[in-house]
Amino acid sequence: MATLTIRNVPEEVKQALRVKAAQDGNSLEEALRQILSDQVVTQDVPASRISAEEIMRRAAELEADEPTDSRYKYYSQKELSDALSGEYEGI
């Protein structure tokens, strides 16, 4: 298990949390663990803001024979490779 340190918590906040924890029959540490766990569990945050379909579409573009950027559409694979390595000045 990990250990967290939270600095600069106002004394009145710490005391209020301690009282609430005691009222619930918990230690301050247990109450804080529960608060943190509840926040993570209740948050329905997607792992990615990009949908699986969008990821697959982008992957398909990467696998396409032609570059998706029209600036590079008329260059050969060799010219593109050389341009990336800095050996081709035409692009």
Image (spheres, rainbow, N blue to C red):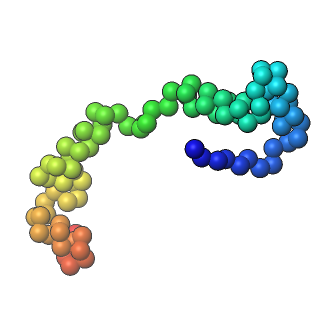
Determine whether, in the image, residue 49 is placed left or right of residue 75.
right
Q: Nearer the viewer, residue 88 or 9?
A: 9
Vertical placement of residue 86 versus 68, above or below? below
Q: Quadrant of residue 71?
A: bottom left
x and y percentages locating residue 80 in the rendered image: 17, 66
Vertical placement of residue 49 versus 19, above or below? below
Q: Name the residue located 22 percent from the left edge and 71 percent from the top edge.
A: 83
Q: Name the residue located 24 percent from the left edge and 39 percent from the top edge.
A: 57
x and y percentages locating residue 27 in the rendered image: 77, 31
Location of the N terminus by quadrant is top right
Q: Name the residue located 77 percent from the left edge and 34 percent from the top edge.
A: 28
Q: Quadrant of residue 77?
A: bottom left
Location of the C terminus by quadrant is bottom left
> How many marks overall?
0
Q: Name the residue located 71 percent from the left edge and 32 percent from the top edge.
A: 30
Residue 90 seen in the figure: no
x and y percentages locating residue 36 in the rendered image: 64, 33
Determine whether, in the image, residue 1 is placed left or right of residue 7.
left
Vertical placement of residue 86 versus 70, above or below? below
Q: Nearer the viewer, residue 10 or 88?
A: 10
